[in-house]
Image (cartoon, helix red, strand yellow):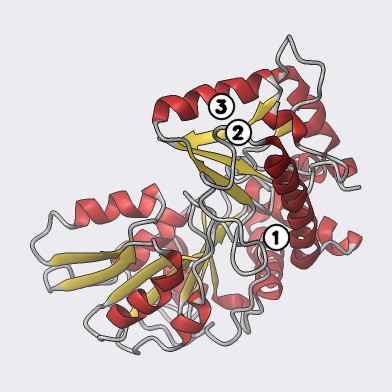
């Protein structure tokens, strides 16, 4: 049903087909590189044409039309009350590090997080911990059922300047139970970041109750399917943090009222960086517009993916595979907290590598992290896909 929007990527995938398999390629690494809809090609060409036609004048269109349109799309998707509070950058690491730079590292900084955060943030914390003033407390994600209570107990202590947690964990695909409700009760003295990358445009998300309490980061690379280079962070209204890492775009908020010292605006420009390539912005807008025109919502995407996940589980249960089974599947509660991929513990990195190679011979593309093998589900998977080939 939805494959018609992805013809060019689906055709291109056949170039990676295994010579000994007649089945079409089934791309199940879509929690990493999600296929782009065909409209993104026209979007890239439109960006080039705007640059050719307008040269430096293209910035008026980008900042006057394109960025506000993207911000409105993000705000509508996440139920944010003020689109102007959506900051843009090429990646979420740049945005999060800009937030970290707002803290005085000559003073004690205590950070609360989990042991299941993506490499970009976890690596940065390891480096920060080399400073004598920085202390990081990592709450184990497992058992997931008690994670909210354990995390909330630490958070409510009020002894942390920053808290950071993923809405859906990148390694397991499990959604942090009750994270948004937990964030609503955080102490005012603690800044909080929700990493929404594996939930944005996958799980329906309503931030209206906490929009002015948390920073929310995500981007277009995964489930929006618009490629690399377009990420965002929502900023609580009234935020007065002054990032040390600040770019010249942030100066735009102060051009007309420039005074001595470094000033900051009260919208997204407070966390703005510097010059970047805006072709990813054009692509992201093209996808948002396509979905709006076709009536494709996050709810409909999530429902479609869950149908595929249920068929996968049915095929898996019938097959009794030595590795792909419920005993090795980290979580599969589709109704109460799961992302758009499944993660299997394979016992060793060697087992995971071997299984990935075996699936590759069946034209099933997936990825792994050490002993974990991940299988993702997407809008471009056929609605009659049985997934039985994975288990033969």
On screen, residue 99 versus residue 43, left or right, reads left
Q: Where is residue 192 in the image (x, y as percent from the top left)?
A: 39, 75
Which one is earlier in the sequence, the residue at label 2 or at label 1? 1
Q: In this view, does 196 lie to the left or right of 28?
A: left
What residue is shown with label 3?
Answer: 356
The tag on residue 61 is 1
Locate residue 20: give its quadrant. Answer: top right
Please indicate, yes or no, whether residue 290 appears anywhere in the rendered image.
Answer: yes
Please say if the residues under marks 2 and 1 sit with CB atoms less than 8 Å apart.
no
* Secondary element at image label 1: helix
- Disc nearer the start of the sequence (3/1): 1
Front disc: 3 or 1: 3
In this rendering, the count of numbered labels is 3
| Residue positioned most to the left | 132
Q: What SS does tag 2 mark?
A: loop
Above or below for 40 versus 193: above
Q: What element does badge 3 sit on?
A: helix
Residue indicated by mark 2: 366
Q: Distance between the residues labelled 2 and 1?
A: 39 Å
State the image coordinates of residue 307 (x, y, percent, origin top left).
Answer: 79, 55
Residue 76, given in percent of the width and then of the height, sits at 71, 74
47 on left or right of 245 = right
Does the residue at mark 3 contact the one at mark 2 (Cβ under 8 Å)?
yes
Left or right, residue 314 beside residue 96: right
Mark sitting earlier along the chain (3/2): 3
Circle 2: is it few (<14), some (14-19), or many (20+) Cα within 10 Å?
many
Residue drawn 36% across the image and 63% down it: 98
Q: Quadrant of residue 239?
A: bottom left
Task: Kindly check if marks 3 and 1 are in contact, taking CB atoms under 8 A apart as contact.
Answer: no
């Amino acid at each position: 049903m939805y494959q018609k929007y992805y013809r060019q990527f689906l055709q291109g995938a056949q170039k990676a087909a295994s010579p000994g398999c007649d089945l079409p390629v089934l791309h199940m690494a879509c929690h990493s590189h999600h296929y782009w809809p065909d409209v993104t090609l026209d979007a890239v060409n439109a960006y080039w044409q705007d640059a050719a036609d307008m040269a430096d004048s293209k910035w008026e269109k980008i900042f006057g039309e394109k960025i506000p349109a993207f911000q409105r799309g993000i705000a509508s998707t996440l139920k944010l009350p003020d689109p102007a509070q959506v900051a843009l950058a090429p990646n979420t690491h740049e945005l999060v590090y800009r937030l970290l730079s707002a803290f005085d590292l000559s003073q004690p900084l205590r950070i609360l997080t989990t042991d299941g955060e993506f490499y970009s943030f976890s690596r940065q914390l390891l480096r920060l911990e080399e400073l004598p003033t920085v202390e990081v407390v990592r709450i184990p994600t497992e058992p997931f059922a008690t994670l909210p209570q354990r995390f909330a107990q630490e958070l409510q202590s009020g002894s942390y300047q920053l808290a950071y947690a993923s809405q859906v964990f990148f390694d397991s695909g499990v959604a942090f139970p009750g994270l948004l409700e937990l964030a609503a009760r955080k102490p005012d003295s603690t800044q909080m970041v929700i990493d929404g990358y594996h939930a944005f445009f996958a799980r329906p998300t309503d931030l209206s109750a906490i929009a002015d309490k948390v920073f929310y980061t995500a981007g277009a690379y995964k489930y929006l399917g618009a490629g690399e280079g377009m990420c965002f962070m929502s900023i609580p209204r009234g935020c007065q943090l002054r990032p040390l890492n600040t770019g010249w775009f942030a100066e735009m908020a102060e051009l007309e009222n420039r005074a001595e010292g470094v000033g900051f605006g009260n919208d997204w420009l407070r966390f703005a960086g510097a010059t970047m390539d805006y072709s990813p912005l054009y692509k992201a807008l093209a996808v948002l517009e396509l979905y709006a025109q076709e009536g494709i919502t996050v709810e409909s995407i999530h429902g479609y993916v869950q149908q595929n996940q249920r068929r996968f589980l049915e095929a898996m249960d019938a097959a009794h595979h030595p590795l792909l089974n419920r005993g090795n599947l980290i979580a599969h509660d589709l109704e109460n907290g799961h992302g758009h991929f499944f993660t299997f513990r394979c016992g060793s990195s060697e087992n995971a590598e071997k299984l990935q190679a075996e699936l590759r011979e069946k034209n099933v593309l997936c990825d792994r992290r050490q002993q974990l093998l991940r299988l993702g589900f997407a809008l471009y998977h056929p609605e009659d896909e049985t997934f039985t080939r994975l288990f033969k």
